Image (cartoon, rainbow, N blue to C red):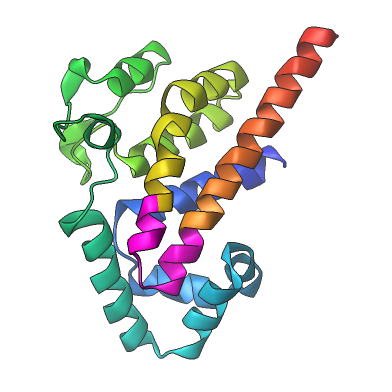
C-alpha cells in the first residue's frame, strides 16, 4: 500500500474515532461508494439507504453509546484493571510521542488524553509523513496492537449499527495488514 493511501486511511480513522460524524463527513461518505464498500457492504447499504437526518441521529446516538457512555477508546483506560486514565508524562504514549518529536498540546485537543485512539491513529499518520518506518513498527508493537484489535472486537459486539460494526472490522484488518507489510519490508531491508 502506498504512503499516500496509508496517510489518508489513518487520517480518516482518526477522525471517525475522535468525534461523531457530522453532516460534511456523512456527505463525503455518501459520495464515495468505493470507500464505503471498502469499509463493508453493510456500512455501504446502511449509509445509502437512509436520509441524512435519520443517519446523523442514529450515528450520533451510536457514537455516544459506544465511545462516551459505555467505553472509552483510551489505551490506559482499556489496559488498566482499575480503569484509570493516565495523563501527562506518566503516560507511556506521551513519552513515545516526545521521543519521536511529536508535540501534543492537550489544551487545544477535544480528546484530552494522549492515548485516545484518535490521537494514536493521528500519530501514526505523522510517522508515515515523516517516513519513520522503524518508529511505526515500534508504536504498533508497544501500543496499537496491544489493545486496539481486542477493544474493537468487543466494541463490534456491542454495536447495533452496521456502519460502526464494519468500521471496527475495517480498522482491525487495515492495521494488521499495515503492520504485516511494515514487518515484511523491515525484514527485507535486513536481508539486503
- Find residue 31 and report its horizontal and vertical position in percent: 56, 76
Residue 31 in view, yes or no: no
**At 42% from the left edge and 42% from the top edge, which residue is drawn?**
150
**At 48% from the left edge and 53% from the top edge, which residue is drawn?**
12
Is residue 11 shown above or below 22?
Answer: above
- Find residue 47 and report its horizontal and vertical position in percent: 48, 80
Is residue 158 shown above or below 125?
Answer: below
In the picture, the quarter occupied by the N terminus is top right
| Between 11 and 189, the one nearer to me in the picture | 189
**At 40% from the left edge and 90% from the top edge, which residue is drawn?**
51
Residue 143 in view, yes or no: yes
Q: Main secondary structure of the magenta part?
A: helix
Q: Is residue 25 magenta?
A: no
In the picture, the quarter occupied by the C terminus is top right
- Find residue 55 and report its horizontal and vertical position in percent: 36, 81
| Between 184 and 96, the one nearer to me in the picture | 184
| Between 43 and 123, the one nearer to me in the picture | 43
Number of marks in the rendered image: 0
Q: What are the residue bounds of the magenta stretch? A: 154-167
Amino acid at each position: 500500500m502506498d504512503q499516500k493511501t496509508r496517510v489518508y486511511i489513518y487520517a480518516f480513522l482518526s477522525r471517525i474515532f475522535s468525534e461523531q460524524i457530522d453532516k460534511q463527513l456523512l456527505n463525503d461518505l455518501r459520495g464515495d461508494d468505493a470507500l464505503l464498500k471498502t469499509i463493508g457492504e453493510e456500512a455501504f447499504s446502511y449509509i445509502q439507504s437512509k436520509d441524512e437526518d435519520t443517519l446523523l441521529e442514529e450515528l450520533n446516538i451510536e457514537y455516544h453509546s459506544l465511545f462516551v457512555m459505555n467505553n472509552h477508546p483510551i489505551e490506559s483506560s482499556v489496559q488498566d484493571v482499575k480503569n484509570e486514565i493516565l495523563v501527562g508524562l506518566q503516560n507511556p504514549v506521551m513519552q513515545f510521542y516526545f521521543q519521536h518529536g511529536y508535540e501534543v498540546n492537550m489544551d487545544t485537543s477535544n480528546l484530552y488524553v494522549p492515548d485516545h485512539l484518535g490521537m494514536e491513529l493521528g500519530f501514526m499518520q505523522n510517522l508515515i509523513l515523516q517516513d519513520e518506518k522503524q518508529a511505526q513498527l515500534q508504536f504498533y508493537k508497544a501500543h496499537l496492537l496491544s489493545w486496539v484489535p481486542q477493544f474493537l472486537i468487543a466494541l463490534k459486539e456491542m454495536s447495533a449499527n452496521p456502519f460502526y460494526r464494519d468500521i471496527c472490522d475495517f480498522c482491525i484488518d487495515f492495521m494488521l495488514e499495515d503492520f504485516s507489510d511494515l514487518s515484511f519490508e523491515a525484514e527485507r531491508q535486513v536481508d539486503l
